[in-house]
Amino acid sequence: MRPTVDVRRARDRFHTEISWLDSWHSFSFSHHYDSANTHHGLLLVSNDDIVTAGTGFETHPHEDMEIVTWVLRGSLVHQDSTGHSGVIYPGLAQRMSAGTGILHSEKNDSWTYDLARYDRHAEPVRFIQMWVVPDEAGITPGYEQLEIDSELLKGGLVTVASGMDRHTNESAIRIRNKYAALHAARVQPGGEIQLPEAPFLHLFVAEGQVSLEGVGLLEQGDAARLTATGGQKLGSADGAEVLVWEMHATIKGW
């Protein structure tokens, strides 16, 4: 493979906007389709969603997909057909393995209350939902979540979800693909991290601005798709939050 860095700007993403949802899609999704933009490595979906309070995704099915949800602001209520339910918030990693089939819903039930005025205010929830293919079809559906906020406060790259053997003893939720791992970092103002080396990397700027070595400035919503490379330094003058998929395989035939 030839080393490449493909920068995708936030404004160029597919966009879905309806009364309760503002969603930006890094890859082909739903009725948005581009045969040249279906995946990178093992990553099929990276949706940047904002959902208004009191609304959300009603119960719907998935199968044979590893789904990782990362909340940036607000809180998201999850319920599924395996009996799992809970509230996902910033710093809590969540994985759902759809396997042979699962039904779930995701709602924004968050409200903030102003007791002095006896009033309540709607708080939108913003989250990134990412899908990778499992390395084995037809597994038993599953769910896992893990609080990693304290690790993120250190400012370095933290493994959020992984199927790789070398991450077995780290604070990470498990996904069913031994060739993929998701890392996150809350880069401190003036701080710096280094990207892992892998055949495929997907860097997404979730919040703030960063400067990527050899590329330059990336702003919120921008992404860089790296092939046959890695090891670049990434810094932020004012602080930022980034998500990095490290992948050692790609989807064949897509």
Image: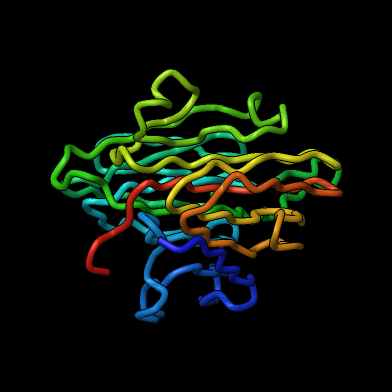
Using the image, determine if residue 119 lies above or below residue 18.
above
User: Which residue is painted at 37% across and 48% down in the image?
Assistant: 67
Q: Residue furthest top?
A: 169
Q: Is residue 169 left or right of residue 116?
A: left
User: Which residue is painted at 52% across and 33% down in the image?
Assistant: 159
Color theme of the render: rainbow
Report x, y in % for residue 35.
35, 80
Quarter the N terminus occupies? bottom left
User: Which residue is painted at 28% across and 59% down in the image?
Assistant: 251
Q: Is residue 250 left or right of residue 151?
A: left
Does residue 110 appear in this view?
Answer: no
Report x, y in % for residue 59.
32, 56
| Depth check, front residue: 84 or 114 | 84
User: Which residue is painted at 39% across and 39% down in the image?
Assistant: 95
Q: Is residue 197 left or right of residue 180?
A: right
Report x, y in % for residue 151.
63, 25
- Number of marks: 0
Using the image, determine if residue 160 lies above or below residue 167.
below
| Depth check, front residue: 104 or 190 | 190
Q: Is residue 16 left or right of residue 125?
A: left
Report x, y in % for residue 94.
45, 38
Q: Looking at the rendering, which quadrant does residue 75 occupy?
A: top right
